[in-house]
Every structure is written in structure tokens, then in C-alpha cells.
Amino acid sequence: MKRRLGFIGLGVMGAPMAAHLMDAGHELYVYNRTRVKADALLAGGAHWCTSPAQVAAHSDIVFTIVGYPKDVEEVYLGGDGIVSSIRSGSIAVDMTTTRPALMKTIASALSSRGAAFADAPVSGGDRGAREATLTFMVGSDEKTFEEIRPYLALMGASINHCGEVSMGQQTKMCNQIVIAGTMAGVSEALVYAARCGLDLESMIRTIRPGAAGCWTLDNLAPRVMRGDWEPGFMVDHFIKDMGLALEEAERMQLCLPSLALVKQLYTAIQAQGLGRKGTQSLVLALQSITGDRLFSLPGKEA
Amino acid sequence: MKRRLGFIGLGVMGAPMAAHLMDAGHELYVYNRTRVKADALLAGGAHWCTSPAQVAAHSDIVFTIVGYPKDVEEVYLGGDGIVSSIRSGSIAVDMTTTRPALMKTIASALSSRGAAFADAPVSGGDRGAREATLTFMVGSDEKTFEEIRPYLALMGASINHCGEVSMGQQTKMCNQIVIAGTMAGVSEALVYAARCGLDLESMIRTIRPGAAGCWTLDNLAPRVMRGDWEPGFMVDHFIKDMGLALEEAERMQLCLPSLALVKQLYTAIQAQGLGRKGTQSLVLALQSITGDRLFSLPGKEA
């Protein structure tokens, strides 16, 4: 069944995700703070709306993927927000990685208008968005999950129901917490290996099949070795996500010392003006502590 | 060619490793601090020696795998040590995970006797030792590596030449540094997930195919979930290894803040009397900070 779908947030993730929905033949109503980013979609037949409220008024299901928690709040709960105009029986799906507690606030506001909500943050990055291979982590009731699943499947390859509203975000937080640990371990090992004169490639080949094996060692260590600091996932965004996890941990009165430390190290990278580089830049923070030049800085020769 | 091989250190790793050498038909000369641990090998035809010196006097190649750096020092450099009696043209191979700098000292002492040396620490644990699937990380000159390789291949499945003497140990240090990071990330994610009420199994299934994927998540998280704290790798040994890496880092004037933190957390586990449990016990240290009982303690019901 062809549906009227809304899409708010047409950034590096949102734009290709919205295109997948439209390519499947659904009628698409879009809004973005910067209109020019909608041009390609509008040329393809999407309808421009002047506010999130207008998108919601036209749509059976509204998808959102924006930036910081304040952006999510504005898009849902602001004067021109989704909640102000959503029709009873509609569904809103927030795919931003954001504050778990905010998801419950929004679900409750939508519920009082007769609308359902799911949080559905993703992993897989802009490449996953372009290739429709994202992993979705969904928090919602069962019925809502079954209703939105076919649309998520147009944008991703792995659609997971993680529990009630907010549990999608909580699963994403777990994902980021694990990554913080593996990034620290791999980065410190690379700095150690470079300093003591090991051949890095041979070191990685030797340890990767065993208990040290991880995605980060396989995918980011090679980038470090060739001095490629371009983002798969951006430092600024990772700091945002670690901040959300630490804020939520503090709310739960939970102590995550390793995550807190790794966030501090990433803050050092940001301070060096490298916030828009990839998370593999952690080695640059580590080497700068000791004044090392083991790995070449962005934009300079090795 | 059948050779006369020496083997010193018949613990949970050494005993099965020595057996593999004997099973291949080599004549075996053994020594261990506690003689009873040699009984099975002696029954199979191995020759008992009363000191490391005596082992070395009989052997073309001597293998050692003991405990702390002081044990390695004693076995090689002590009054009754290997260096005191090794024959010119022989080779000694230390498979203990130990201080990298000590390897150079020993190599130099052996060299003055006309003997060669390789450091060859392993990963893969006691299961790898029993099944001869260990990974060897070898530091030595090329010629020595080629001479010992066939014997290492009787005990392991992956034999890697990592560089000159000490580089085997340095590679093993990198292995342990990566593991410290992944253990921290996975453990903090598990505590976080349990506290916020996520289904742990579903959380792991969701995040494991992506950037959070790692051996620790696949192999140790399931143990945590079923309250199995028995060692794959023991907390006491991991603390020893992290201490060696930090000591070497300090010698190199290198700063590894994440490794230092993780070692502190493991020290808390040791303080709780759980030093002989497995490294997955890190979650127990984390939950104890906040007085949580998310995961059942060893020997108690869930």
C-alpha cells in the first residue's frame, strides 16, 4: 500500500534515506532547515513543506533524523512542531541518536493526540544510508513496530525491535559504549606499536584472529596506518553520543569510568580543531599527550 | 630430524604443550618447580632433570613457559639457570608473556655462550595449548625463527615472526592493550544495558554485526549473561600482563590512560578475592562501584 510519508532532516544521512522511501513509490512530504538540501528530492517529485507541523499534517508516518536533542525537541514539541498538527492514527519515527528520556516525553505528547511513536536510531553511517544497509534499533510497542518495519526495511538491512519506547536509543548507547572501548584499546595499541618499532601491519595480522579481534582493528587501524583521517563516523558526533550515554548513566546513577575517559580524550581531538575528522583520530590525541609524531597530522605529509 | 628438546614450566599451558612435542617423537628433558606436574610426561618417556641448567645441558632447543619476570630471570640467569650450562649452537625459546627488555638481556647472555634466543609468547589460552591451536608471536633473527618454527607448529596453529628479540613480547603487549579496551567497552555496555532494562541477548544480537563487533562481545558477554565467571583467561594473569605493558610504556615514556584505568578496575576485582576468575569479571567490579547486583556473584544463585 502506497502511503503518504513525511521526512524531516535531509542531512548526509537523511537525504539518501528519504530517497529510498520515494524510490519505492511513496508520496513524500519533506522539511529541512536548509531548503537547498531538499532540491534533489523535490526534483524527483517530493512535496516541500514549510514546517514540521505541515509535514505531520500531510503524512501517515513521519520520519525524523536531525542533530542534537534540542533539535529533536524543536521538531516535535516546538510551536510549529509535529505534535501540534499530527492526525490521530498517524505514527512518528525519530531516527536521530538522541536522549533516551526525551523519547518517552515525545511518545507521551503524541499519545495525547492519538498518534503513536517509535525511536529508531541507526548505525552504519552515511555509507549505510546511501546503500540502504543501515541497522535500525527500534523502541516502540509491537503494533507500531510491525507497521513501520516495511518502511525501515527500505532504508536498512537489519531491523531490530529492542523493547518499548526509548529502548532503541538505549541499544544505540550500548553500541557507542562498546565502540568507545574498542577505539581506546586499538588506538593505544597502535601508538605503543609505533613507538616500540613494530611493523604495524604485521602486528595487526598477528593479533586480529584472536581475542583482540574487533571491527575497529580491521576497519579503522588500516586508515590510521595510511594517515587517512576522513570520517566514517565524525568525532563531533561521537562526542555527542558519548555525552548522551554519560548523561543517561548519571541519571540512572551508573558509573562508566572508561567511557568518561574516552570522551575526555576525544574532547582533546576536538580542541585540536579535528572535530570533523573520523573517530580514528583518537591516536592523534594520544600521541599529542607525549609530543609524539608517530602518525602524520591531517593535511600534512607523513 | 628427531631432536633433544628441553621444556621448563609444566603448568596449565606448559604441560600440554610439552606433550605435543613428545608426541611428535622428540626426546624430551623436563624440569618444573613442582615435580608432580611432570608425572604424566615422565610416564610417557620424558626425562626428569633437577634444574634448568641440567635441561639446557641435554637439549638442542630449550623451551620455557613460566610465570612472572622474576621466574624467567631465575630460570635463565640464576645459579642453576639455562645460561650457566647451555651448549654453543643451542637455542632457547621463552614462551612466557614477560618483560620485553628482559628478553634482550637474556639474548645477550646466551649469545656470549654461543647460543641463540627467541621470545615467543602465545595467545589462545589453555584450550589453545591442549588443542595445539595457539598463536605464537616470535621475536628473533630470521635464522633462529626458521629453526624453531617446525617445533612451534607442533604446539600452535599460527606462527608469526614479529621482528628481532623482544618484538614477540611487544606484539603480545599490543594484543593485551586491545583486549583491555574491548573488555572495558563490552563490560560497561553490559552494566548499562542491564540497568536500563534492555534484553541483553537481543542487544548483543543487534549490535554485534556492526562497528561494535568484537571477540569479547561474541565470546565473553554470553558468559557474563549466564553468570559463568570461570577463566578463559585469569584476572591475576591479565593484571600481570597489563602491568608489563604499562611498565614498558613508562620506560618508553608513552602515556596509555585507558590501559591504566582498566588495570585499576581489574585490581578492584582482585581485591574482592576474584583474581582466579575470568577476565569477564570486570562487570563485577563495575557493578560494585555503584552497589549494584545486576549480575550474580561467583558461587551464588542468580
Image: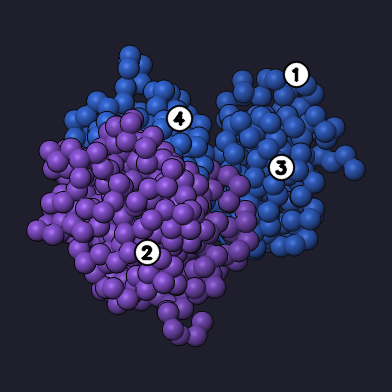
Chain colours: A purple, B blue
Q: Amino acid at mark 1?
A: Ala
Point out the tag, 4 or 1, that comes first from the N-terminus: 1
The chain ID associated with circle 4 is B
Label ID, residue B157: 3
User: Are dots 2 and 3 in contact, CB under 8 Å?
Assistant: no
Q: Amino acid at mark 4?
A: Pro
Mark 1 neighbour class, 10 Å CA radius: few under 14, some 14 to 19, many 20 or more: few
The x and y percentages for residue B44 are 78, 21
Please, which residue is most extreme toward the top here?
A: B301
The local secondary structure at tag 3 comes to strand
Label ID, residue A46: 2
User: Are dots 1 and 3 in contact, CB under 8 Å?
Assistant: no
Mark 4 neighbour class, 10 Å CA radius: few under 14, some 14 to 19, many 20 or more: some
Q: CA distance from mark 4 to mark 2?
A: 46 Å
Point out the tag, 4 or 3, that comes first from the N-terminus: 3
The chain ID associated with circle 2 is A
Label ID, residue B222: 4
Most foreground residue, A158 or A19: A19
The chain ID associated with circle 1 is B
Q: Amino acid at mark 3?
A: Ala
